[in-house]
């Protein structure tokens, strides 16, 4: 019977890696990032190391800032389940391609095209836009999503292994689109699909106003709905006056997760909790920033105002019920 992470014994002081050792890891990560221009690389962090990290270290390892820089695609490669977290913010009239050159792709993913061996969810957190994947156009209004498979496109091109050409476009000059991207390794092809809150697989109400955590979870890419190889994706909207997401907290040892917070006012923040239940740490997260959540970490947050977030997971399975609840009394 696996021991719950909450009950796992803490390492002795000698076993805890000091901050200096963490810096060595970071130097290696920085070198890897430099070797792969265009894709920032984040290496995995052992939970014992997190205990000794400063706020700056925590942010460097787990927080993805500047997702939506106008006129560019930003990509961060996480070694946690090899997810790629990205943002594309095309200026109206100037489509942005998903990077495909060997100088960008060779080091990080070693494939001739981004989706040769990957699938991707795209969620539009901005104004109206469209995504063109190998000539197929998906119009995406605000808060709509698409699933782009590993080998999208008409049957004759499937043997080319992967959607070769993906472009992002804004169609409303006054409100540029902001495409949030989450990509996982994929070894099978599934159907491309457009999804919005109306055809979401399920809308789940959770929490209560009394517990300040009333919210609705929309399941966008999940088993039984939109099929994928590894990726699951959804969006959660907090009810007015509620601040807490995912509290009571949980773990899912067999999947890593990424949260991308949006809909926050410029001066509002989410205090995001991460870490093993017995050693939580916090990140102060601003609008349109994402947090990498390794499988050993809880993921929860309280906002200083209403907010929404896109959650996406990748790992051993896509089984949403495969979670381990964490008792409130176990949190430290
Ligand atoms: O508010 C919530 O609760 C969530 O959105 C939880 C996420 O779905 C999640 O953490 C899945 O592991």
Image (tube, helix red, strand yellow):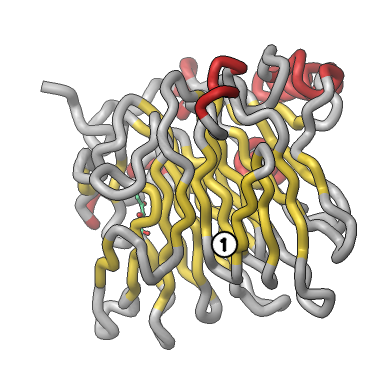
Left or right of 240 on screen, residue 61: right
Asked whether residue 17 appears in the rendered view, the answer is no
Quadrant for the N terminus in the image? top left
Asked whether residue 134 appears in the rendered view, the answer is yes
Decide which of 51, 141 is in the foreground and name it.
141
In the image, residue 307 lies at what x, y percent? 52, 74
Does residue 219 lie above or below 269 as drawn? above
Q: Which residue is mark 1?
A: 261
In the image, residue 24 lies at what x, y percent? 73, 17
Left or right of 95 on screen, residue 225: left
In the image, residue 223 lies at what x, y percent? 27, 42
Left or right of 239 on screen, residue 77: right
> Is the residue indicated by label 1 positioned so its CB lies within 8 Å of ligand 1?
no
The residue positioned 61% from the left and 21% from the top of the image is 116
Does residue 24 lie above or below 299 as drawn? above
In the image, residue 273 lies at what x, y percent? 47, 54
Labels in figure, total: 1
Q: Secondary structure at mark 1?
A: strand
Which residue sits furthest left? 1
The answer to which quarter of the image holds residue 79 is top right
The residue positioned 89% from the left and 56% from the top of the image is 94
The answer to which quarter of the image holds residue 208 is bottom left
Quadrant in which ligand 1 is drawn: bottom left
The residue positioned 70% from the left and 50% from the top of the image is 87
């Amino acid at each position: 019977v696996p021991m719950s992470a909450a009950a796992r014994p803490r390492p002795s002081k000698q076993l805890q890696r000091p901050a200096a050792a963490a810096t060595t890891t970071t130097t290696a990560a920085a070198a890897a990032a430099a070797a792969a221009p265009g894709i920032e690389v984040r290496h995995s962090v052992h939970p014992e190391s997190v205990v000794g990290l400063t706020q700056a270290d925590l942010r460097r390892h787990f927080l993805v800032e500047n997702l939506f820089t106008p006129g560019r695609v930003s990509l961060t490669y996480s070694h946690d389940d090899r997810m790629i977290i990205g943002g594309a913010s095309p200026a109206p009239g100037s489509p942005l391609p998903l990077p495909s050159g060997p100088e960008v792709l060779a080091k990080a993913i070693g494939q001739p095209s981004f989706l040769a061996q990957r699938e991707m969810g795209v969620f539009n957190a901005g104004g109206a836009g469209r995504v063109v994947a190998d000539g197929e156009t998906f119009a995406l209004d605000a808060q709509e999503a698409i699933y782009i498979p590993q080998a999208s496109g008409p049957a004759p091109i499937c043997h080319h292994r992967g959607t070769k050409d993906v472009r992002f476009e804004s169609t409303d000059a006054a409100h540029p689109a902001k495409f949030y991207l989450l990509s996982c390794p994929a070894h099978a092809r599934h159907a491309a699909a457009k999804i919005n809150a109306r055809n979401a697989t399920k809308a789940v109400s959770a929490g209560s106003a009394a517990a300040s955590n009333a919210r609705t979870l929309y399941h966008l890419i999940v088993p039984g709905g939109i099929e994928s190889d590894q990726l699951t994706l959804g969006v959660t909207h907090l009810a007015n006056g509620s601040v807490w997401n995912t509290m009571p907290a949980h773990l899912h040892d067999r999947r890593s997760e990424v949260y991308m917070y949006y809909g926050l006012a410029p001066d509002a923040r989410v205090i995001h909790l991460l870490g093993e239940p017995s050693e939580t740490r916090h990140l102060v997260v601003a609008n349109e920033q994402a947090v990498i959540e390794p499988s050993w970490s809880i993921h929860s947050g309280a906002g200083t105002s209403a907010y929404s977030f896109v959650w996406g997971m990748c790992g051993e399975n896509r089984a949403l019920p495969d979670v381990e609840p964490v008792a409130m009394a176990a949190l430290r």
